[in-house]
Image (cartoon, rainbow, N blue to C red):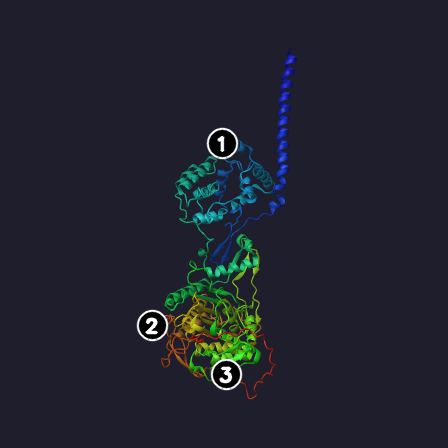
Amino acid sequence: MTNRGGWRRMTVWRAVLLGTLMVDGLVLGLALGVYATVAPMVPDEATLGNYRPQETTRIFAKDGTLLASLFVENRQVVPVASMPRNLVNATIAIEDQRFYEHPGVDPRGIGRALRENAARSSKQGASTITQQLARQVFLSREQTMLRKFKEMTLAVRIERRFSKEEILGLYLNEICYGHRAYGVVAAADTFFGKKLDQLTLGECALIAGLAKNPVGYSPILHPEAAKGRRNMVLQKMWEQRKISQQQLDEAKAEPIHARKKGAEPWKLHNYRAPWFTTYVIDQLEKQFGHDKVYGGGLQIYTTLDLELQAQAQELLSESMANLAHARANRGAVVALDPRTGAILAMVGGKEFEKDEFNGATQAYRQPGSSFKPIVYTTAMEKIGLSPYDTYSGSPSTFRGYWGVYSPQNFSANQGGEMSVATALAQSVNLVAVRVIIKTGPQSVIEQAHRMGIDEKGKKLQPYPSLALGSGEVTPLELGNAYCAFANGGFRVDGYGVECITDSRGNPIFTHQVKPRRVMSPRTYTNMNSMLQGVVSNGTGRRAAINSPCGGKTGTTNSAKDVWFVGITPGLACAVWIGNDSNIRMYGATGGDFCAPIWRSMALRARELARDRGHAWPDEFPRPGEEGPPSVAQTGNANAEEQKKEEKGEAKTETKAGPTGPIATTVDPNVPGANTKPVPGTPVTDPVGGRPTPGTTGTPDGPGVVAPGPKPEPKPEPKPEPKPEPKPEPKPEPKPKPEPKPAPGEAPDPG
């Protein structure tokens, strides 16, 4: 009986063992089957090793000030070693207490969750940190068993590929904490405006608690719920002996000082210098693509001078307010370094928050007489034009493939024979028309293309009226083209980005200045001199400063657009004012509305250079150089001499020039002489009290006006041989006749 009973007991145990083995085998087989099914659906270890989270791209001004953050997911990746240990411990305490013990999936945690869910009739999660990382990076949030099996399989692979510290780093850099903050760096900045090393214990616990429900526990939206969750995290840390009782009590007593409104760096109106910044973003997307720009963690260092930008914005906004009565409601200012093409300032309107249209780059408007320097440059290159050549300014009718064209001057006093230099200074239309007809409108267009204007060939048409600015340009195009008149005759393409690195500081891109000669040294000398004459004796007198400078005014038919584009050895700047309705502005001329803005920009640029220890370039480059002058080598190195030189502007002097009085300007910083010229009001010439050309007064007659201080010398007894006559070009196909100006429209006064 004893043996029989023992045999029975052994049989039962064998049956239990066999059953257990069969169940285990079934479970193992099922698990292997699931794994074999799911494994091909999830990334392999090689793919996991190549994973890089999206990072926020940052754009900086020239001085390192942050202009904008670009992202789909606002994130800055940092190693876990640089994160506060309290933040790491708080995350483990609330999310995965056995993180360092399990292989990616925690069976004990699953069992505990099942028991708690059954006992409390509530939903208790059992996902480990590794599983959450797998779901966040590679999987969707669909609530299916297949997704859960994928998550567990991928978690095991992640544990095989990465160390525990690497997994923590990936998780804390990847997870979403709400308000578009991804990763702990963005969370610290979004909620508290702090860097990681500035966070308190309570703030670390609050951030750690956000992962479960970023919206419900947001300290911005739900501060009381956030406080309760924070205290729960602190209690878990104390239970796991990560903090002391004293630390627990002090952290729970901490008030929550979250931002009233989360940082919203993705919104355009939060960009610094938004006109320039959005222009740079557009250029970057064309070069690198949207995904790289908004997720590549690029560090972009630009050319923007924030102080000069602030001056440009203030000047344009003030002018728009002062000129509202004149129906001006749109304008733009673009400033460049003519030696390199670096864009120093760009303002495309009055208020970016209300209107994001960028007048500096998107407004194609007629340039009026500010286009005439391109015409005269072409003539000097093509037919050997000289500043001393004389042409008639008398009205006439011109017939050709364009049909019949009868342009007019602004004033009846602008007829008669005059030099080309005088014609440009006084903005005499008929001389420019005669020159373009002799040179060929198509040649002028080609020269404009070489200088960077309308390279796509859509905005300039080969008609004689092109001489008076009938084409369309942007302020950036025209300002960029004028750089050649200041740097020795070279085209230097305008650019806004100096260099780009990745998030770790490795260089990706560095801008290289590539100057191209677009006019001969002789043409450069003549045009530079003539543009200086416009400011010293012509329609641009309101732009004059006591440093070498030149420029050209522009006013279109019916005064719908007015311009001043000017140059100094260290600054090229285009100013445009108009309106959205493209209708006449009252009393508008480029010399009156725009030249004062340009003058203030030039003075501010000179002042900033001096304050920063960089002397203002004291002369334009000599002709014949191999390229534009070096920024480092140009100018007087003694800043004190610059200060003494500027003090000389304190007195208003009338200097006898070669053909009459030349008025210098008054330093606005001197007491009693700091009244800013108000656009829309006439300026009186210091000699004789007559209105200055280019103001709302009647322009002076075309009296003899010499070029600026360095005119081309008259030829010696041996005259320069005239170029052999060229055969007449083949007649161009006849387009439709150009319409005449509407009756009553005023010709361009410059």
**How would you rate the neighbour count of disc 2 (Cα within 10 Å): few for under 14, some for 14-19, many for 20 or more?**
few
Instruction: Tell me which amino acid carries mark 1.
Output: Asn
Q: Secondary structure at mark 3?
A: strand
**How would you rate the neighbour count of disc 3 (Cα within 10 Å): few for under 14, some for 14-19, many for 20 or more?**
some
Tell me residue 34's x, y (percent). 62, 35
User: Does 144 sit above or below residue 622?
Assistant: above
| Total numbered circles | 3
* Residue position marked by numbered label 3 in the rendering: 391
Instruction: Tell me which amino acid carries mark 2.
Output: Gly
Q: CA distance from mark 3 to mark 2?
A: 44 Å
Quadrant including the C terminus: bottom left
Q: CA distance from mark 1 to mark 2?
A: 83 Å
Nearer to the camera, 328 or 274? 328
Residue 196 seen from this side: no
* Residue position marked by numbered label 1 in the rendering: 117
User: Does 317 sit above or below residue 750?
Assistant: above
Quadrant including the N terminus: top right
Q: Secondary structure at mark 2?
A: loop
* Residue position marked by numbered label 2 in the rendering: 672
Instruction: Tell me which amino acid carries mark 3.
Output: Tyr
Tell me residue 104's x, y (percent). 57, 38
